[in-house]
Image (cartoon, grey):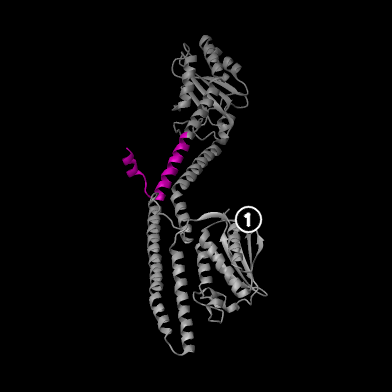
Amino acid sequence: MSALLDRLWPKSLAGRLTLYLVLALAVAQAGLTLLLSSQRDVFVATLTHNQSLNQTVTLARLLDQYPSSEAERLTAAFGSRQSCAWVRTAPPPAHTMTSSEIQLAKVLTSMLHGVRAGEPLVVVEAAPAARQHCDETGAPVPPPADSSALPDTDGDHRDGAMSSERFAALAIDVPLADGRWLSVRTRVDVPGDFDRMTLITFLLSSIAVSVATALVVRHETKSLRALADASERLGKGEAVAALPTNGPNEVSAATRAFNTMQERLREFIGERIRLLAGISHDLRTPITTLRLKAEFIDDEAVREDLIKTIDELATICEATLAFTRAEAASEDTKVLDLRGLVREVEQELLLAGLPVREGEIEPVRCACRPVALKRAVRNLVENAVRYGKRAEISVFRAADQAMIRIDDEGPGIAADRLAEAFEPFVRLEPSRNPETGGIGLGLGIARGIVSAHGGTLTLSNLEPGLRAEISLPILA
């Protein structure tokens, strides 16, 4: 049975949504049918307990007991503002009764036991007929040929005639034993709930469709939300496990494409990192050989200049190796208060004797990879100290972003070279001394780490000084 349902169950999102909506409308229609049936029963019960049936039975018994000459006097005595009666010799026009009218006729039949000569005919006429069922003198006025009846669940064409009226006319024709027919017309009140049937129908359908739509969208887009979350995490550099390929065909196809893309990206980036690490590692041997050979150069000035260049090349290789090791290492994302992370960096640098001070510090929680983010902040602070004499670190919240700000008191960077500062191995400091100018990887590494967290790193000039700002998505 389960396998059969799996085969028959729609595979596309459109098919599933359509099926759910059809089922919801079916439930709403079933509820409406029950409501209409209940209202019809209420209306029939109202007419059953109305005095019209009792008065009709009483009048029929009187006509059966008294001579036919008394018929006019008896029917006239029965008349009132709400009802009238007369005796006819010809049978009434043929009429197919609805289920509600049949039910009333059965009640009347049991009450007329021993009086009638056949089955009574009951018609519930529409409100327009109720207004003119008797004339000003009390004489009966035949009902119109296209009279309508009360709502009926059998689907009769007259079902909607009274949907906006509060009263109707009950027409009863009883065959008497002598061949005559007693015709009675009575105006009766009907339940006022008919006025609200359209509204009730709309509300039932709307509620059913709304609930079904909310449930199906929430259920069927669960895998889409998981896919969006995984994409966001992948964009931040986090390791994401392969997603299960369930749900509609469209979502399953997107999930499979995401899993394939993620695997290819991981292999591509890993291969590039391994290649870069291999090149940097393999350069160690020839660099060491070059340095040994440079020691045998007789010209001291040339020797010193060559050794300085070789040492710089070795420093670049070591920095590249350190960068690739950090990129290759995986680190779990944690939620933490950035105050603690920044203060750890501050204490480490203070212990190293660097002039670092604390600025504005606010509690801001953020999801990050702590070791990588500390490295980015440390690189920025070391740059600020190297080029700007001292550094001031601030942590605060701005709108929906967590901000880490590092200010220095240096000369800043020319406005047309701010973007260039992030390029790897680009040094804006004119000296070739790595002790003062570095090798040009610090800002590039810091920006890569921040971007992997879904944030941004910007530089701007102060008067005097340079400001580096890290902006990260805040944890709500």
Q: Residue 209, position in %: x, y?
A: 49, 43
Where does the N terminus fall, quadrant-wise?
top left
Q: Residue 60, position in %: x, y?
A: 52, 14
Residue range in magenta is: 1-30
Q: Amino acid at mark 1?
A: Pro
Q: Which of the pair 144/231 is nearer the observer? A: 231
The answer to whether any part of residue 73 appears in the image is yes
Please count the marks in the image: 1
Q: Which of the pair 356/82 is nearer the observer? A: 356
332 is higher (above) or lower (below) than 319: above
- Horizontally, is 176 left or right of 384 in the view? left
Q: Which residue is mark 1?
A: 363
Residue 128 in magenta?
no
Element marked by disc 1: loop
**For residue 200, what is the image quadrant?**
top right
The answer to whether any part of residue 454 appears in the image is no
72 is higher (above) or lower (below) than 369: above
Q: Which residue is drawn at the image coordinates 40% and 70% (left, top)? A: 277
Q: Which of the pair 461/228 is nearer the observer? A: 461
314 is higher (above) or lower (below) than 141: below
Q: Residue 392, position in %: x, y?
A: 64, 67
Q: Which of the pair 53/298 is nearer the observer? A: 298
> Label 1 neighbourhood size at 10 Å, few (<14), some (14-19), many (20+)?
some
